[in-house]
Amino acid sequence: MAQAGINNRLDRPVDQARDHVLGSANAPITLVEYGSYACPHCRAANERIAEVRDQLGDRLRYVFRHRPLTGNELARRAADLVERAPDSKTFWDAHVTLMTRSGELTEDDLAAVANNLGLPPDTIKSEEAAKRAKARVEADEKSARASGVMFTPTFFINGRRYDGPWDESSFVDAMIGRLGHRVRAAALDFAAWAPSAGILLLLATVLAIVVTNSRFGPGFQAFWEQSFGFTFDGASFELSLLNWVTDGLLTIFFLVVGLEIKRELTVGHLASIRSAALPIAAAIGGMVVPAALYIALIPSGPWAHGWGVPMATDTAFAVALIVMMGSRVPVELRIFLTAAAIVDDIGAIVVVALFYSDAVHVQYLVAAAAVVALLALLNHVRIYNLAPYILLGIALWALVHESGLHASLAGVVLALFIPTRPPADLNALMAQANAILATEAQYSDEVLRHGPSLPALRSLDAIHDRLESPADRLLRHAGARSSYIVLPLFALANAGVPMSMEVIHGHEQLMLAIMVGLVIGKPLGLIGASALAVWLGAAIKPSEYSWRQLAGAGALAGIGFTMSLFIASQAFPVATDFAAAKIAVFTASIVSALIGVALLWNAGRQAGDDRLVAVQATSR
């Protein structure tokens, strides 16, 4: 699944003439703070900033921008007041006074600064200079919103948001850019880029194809066929490396899919019938029509079982392409396609469970049912520790694998029982954390004491655990590993195919059925079912995107890749059949991507032209 992130880059570059700056323009390190004079955390961080400036000296340039606390009139008046300073030195004097004069911002602080500036408090609002000061504060606030600032203080180091601790040591590590921090920052930047998952998946696919068709091809294939496992008291459990990836690691992907389905059905875009109707209808049409076209072209024979291959949509690639087109594609269309893909995933899971499993061994299935009952019991008694769920999930995976069903389905079942919790009372948790830290700070200088006490650490751990539900925490951690480790490894292990006419020869009908299903069946089914649902009054199409843009999204849904390859690996046990199916999926995905991008690009340009004409007509 694609990972989306909020903006973590500084929106407005630092301007020496416009911004409030301490330090040289040539300093290698620039620290930008969005803060508020009424924010207690900003006032606490102010001392840390002074320590860092003392340590780094001329290497640091510090910039302060306003982001007054929302709804706090005193904070806004303080920001407006300090902007009345006639020069940089006076501004920083007033800045330090407001940050340090008292424990929290008061009317007396504003009066003292106004007196230092030679401004009677009762005349501040009426003067022209006050209007300019207000405009400057509002410009900083606009920059804060564009930079993704959610709270104060928020820091940016050399243009990138800093999300680490505010102590002096952590600040310095981040600013100097030690290797560990640089690697972590680069990884977070890449993950925050929405198309990153799709790009990584594409690179793994290309690498697998290139290596397979090079002189290293036989060794590459032999590598994935190596067996790994364990033996205990005469019993053994061994799988090839390929099967460990397809049956084992891919379970994490199915776990993530299950958690995302659970979230969408409870609080997401599928939580209400009104919002879910259109993507559900579109997804059903996008599954039924491709399968029907495949069956029409291959009604019988050894390949007839492959009708599930063209049913699936690869969300990572589709969403990556939409994001890369930027404002040409409405956000609402991306939401629609993501919601439809979730329903598509549900359909794919059902199809795999019912039609692409081996002969069922009842004894293992009964044991798996017992494990599921234990998971249900843990959920019922509200056990929020993830450890027992993960241990039972591993046992469930092994039993499902031995039962004849595809082992990765254990991930979906496990996801259904990972508990959710009501939202935390953040004010209560913050008060508790502040009380603990304040108490610990009183003893920080004692002899033979290093850091917080063990009871304090346990309490802080409990507060951290309560901030999000176990399901949300697991999705946050497992989702990234699924997108950036599991799926690329799956592509690396499964996407390698010899590109030769020998593979294609004799498989033309199979390849045609898959390609027709993905390239024609997907958009035809998606658009047709959507139109039918709207015509019947069962769903409403948002006005933010046109039918032409919906057609573009339908074409992108023809990018099958991950699930298509997975189902193909189950449907075609003969190596040459699977190789031909892979080539068909690759070709169809490329063609679908090109058609979808072309439709959305042109539709987006037309929509932009229409908006421009409307604006011009209104202004006349």
Image: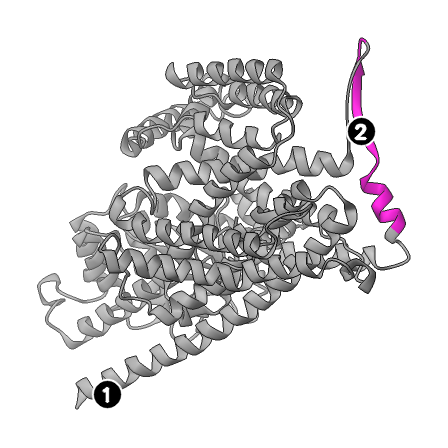
Q: Which mark is residue 452?
A: none
Q: Quadrant of the C terminus?
A: bottom left
Residue 620 falls left or right of residue 13: left
Q: Which mark is residue 228?
A: 2
Closer to the camera in the image, 556 or 256: 556
Membership of 242 in magenta stretch = no
Closer to the camera in the image, 20 or 113: 20
Residue occupying image coordinates x 82% and y 10%: 234
Crowdedness near tag 1: few (<14), some (14–19) or many (≥20) residues, C-alpha within 10 Å: few
Residue 304 falls left or right of residue 259: right
Q: Residue 252 at x, y = what percent?
A: 58, 36
Crowdedness near tag 2: few (<14), some (14–19) or many (≥20) residues, C-alpha within 10 Å: few
Quadrant of the rendered structure where residue 335 is?
Answer: bottom left
Task: Compare marks 1 and 2 and give the one earlier in the sequence.
Answer: 2
Q: Is 248 located above or below residue 280 in the figure?
A: above
Q: Residue 609 at x, y = what percent?
A: 34, 83
Evaluate whether residue 13 shows in this view. yes
Which residue range is magenta in the image?
218-233
Q: How many marks on residues?
A: 2
Quadrant of the rendered structure where residue 316 is?
Answer: bottom right
Q: Is 260 located above or below residue 34 in the figure?
A: above
Residue occupying image coordinates x 60% and y 36%: 356
Mark 1 falls on what kind of element?
A: helix
Task: Kindly identify the amino acid type of the residue bearing the numbered disc 2.
Answer: Phe
Membership of 223 in magenta stretch = yes
Q: Is 543 located above or below residue 338 in the figure?
A: below
Please tell me whether mark 1 or mark 2 is closer to you in this view: 2
Mark 2 falls on what kind of element?
A: strand
Residue 495 falls left or right of residue 341: right
Q: Residue 65 at x, y = what percent?
A: 36, 62
Furthest-top residue in this view: 233
